[in-house]
Image (spheres, coloured by chain):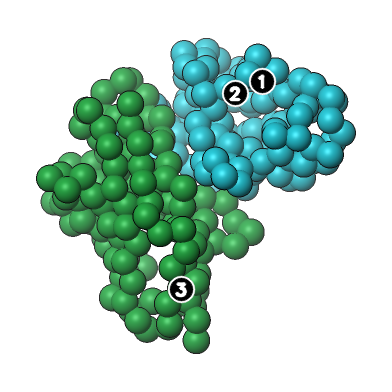
Chain colours: A cyan, B green
């Protein structure tokens, strides 16, 4: 079946602009995770959703970052007033449930470049 | 809190040679352990995981890792590598308790297999 999809695959924006990154999880997966992969920082957890709620937002780097999930499916990560340090690959993953016994399946990522 | 250390950022090796990618973790609670692989221009894929039971776990493509609780390690090994194993490998942990599967990643090890 279809895996996790993310769009766009690449996004180049100017400093100060807002961007929206989209994630379509595997159908039926209730848990959804956002991670960021950047040079010098490795892979870092940003936020996770169980259904439409986000119990843990502790990984969001600043209040310019927000995320939502609607209908227990698609999620959008929004970065307002982008800065150059926001440049990274943003990865989305989904799993059947939140238990660690459920494998997280990763999407291909969105490469964000802030000029 | 958990943390993961991958001691080698890059490991060059010749084809058919053995390889070991090192991973150490720190945690005040019991954890599950994972190795993910990222092939060039592809997304993250789960390679193998330790949840419980036998401390030696294997992947379908010949990799194995052994959970060593006393040394807090989960090193990845393969007795004979192929060119196609060239990729970046990430060790990750998640706390068993906490209600959800937030992955904490190491910085990654880039394995380069040369002919």
Real-space CA distance between mark 3 and mark 1, rounded to the nearest whole angstrom: 38 Å
The image's mark for residue B12 is 3
Residue A29 in picture, x, y percent from top left: 49, 30
| Vertical arrangement, residue A109 with respect to residue B96, above or below | below
Q: Quadrant of the N terminus of chain B?
A: top left
| Vertical arrangement, residue A13 with respect to residue A31, above or below | below
On the same chain, marks 3 and 1? The answer is: no
Q: Is residue A92 left or right of residue B80?
A: right
> Residue under mark 2: which chain is it in?
A
User: How many C-alpha atoms fall within 10 Å of the one at disc 3: few (<14), some, or many (≥20)?
Assistant: few
| Vertical arrangement, residue A54 with respect to residue B61, above or below | above
Q: How many marks?
A: 3
Residue drawn at point x = 33 percent, y = 32 percent: B2
Is residue A27 at all visible to an observer of this figure? no
Label 3: element kind: strand
Residue farthest toward the bottom in the current orientation of the protein = B115
> Residue under mark 1: which chain is it in?
A
Residue occupied by mark 2: A61
Q: Nearer the viewer, residue A73 or B24?
A: B24
Residue B11 in picture, x, y percent from top left: 43, 68
Residue drawn at point x = 27 percent, y = 37 percent: B26
Residue depth check, mark 2 versus mark 1: number of the one nearer the observer: 2
Label 1: element kind: strand
> Residue under mark 3: which chain is it in?
B
Examine the image and state in which quarter residue A110 appears.
top right
CB-based contact (under 8 Å), mark 2 and mark 1: yes
Label 2: element kind: loop
Residue A115 in picture, x, y percent from top left: 84, 39
Residue occupied by mark 1: A65
């Amino acid at each position: 079946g279809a895996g996790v999809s993310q769009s766009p695959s690449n996004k180049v924006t100017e400093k100060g602009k807002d961007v929206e990154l989209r994630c379509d999880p595997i159908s039926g997966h209730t848990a959804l995770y956002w991670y960021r992969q950047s040079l010098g920082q490795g892979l870092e957890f940003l936020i996770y959703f169980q259904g439409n709620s986000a119990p843990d937002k502790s990984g969001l780097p600043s209040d310019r970052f927000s995320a939502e999930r609607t209908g227990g499916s698609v999620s959008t990560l929004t970065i307002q007033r982008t800065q150059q340090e926001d440049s990274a690959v943003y990865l989305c993953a989904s799993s059947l449930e939140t238990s660690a016994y459920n494998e997280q399946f990763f999407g291909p990522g969105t490469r964000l470049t802030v000029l | 809190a958990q943390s993961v250390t991958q001691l080698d950022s890059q490991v060059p090796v010749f084809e058919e040679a053995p390889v070991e990618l090192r991973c150490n973790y720190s945690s005040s609670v019991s954890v599950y352990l994972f190795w993910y692989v990222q092939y060039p221009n592809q997304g993250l894929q789960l390679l193998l995981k330790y949840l419980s039971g036998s401390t030696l776990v294997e992947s379908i493509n010949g990799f194995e890792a052994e959970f060593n609780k006393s040394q807090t390690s989960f090193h990845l090994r393969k007795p004979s590598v192929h060119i196609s194993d060239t990729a970046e490998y990430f060790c990750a942990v998640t706390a068993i308790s906490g209600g959800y599967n937030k992955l904490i990643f190491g910085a990654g090890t880039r394995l380069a297999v040369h002919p």
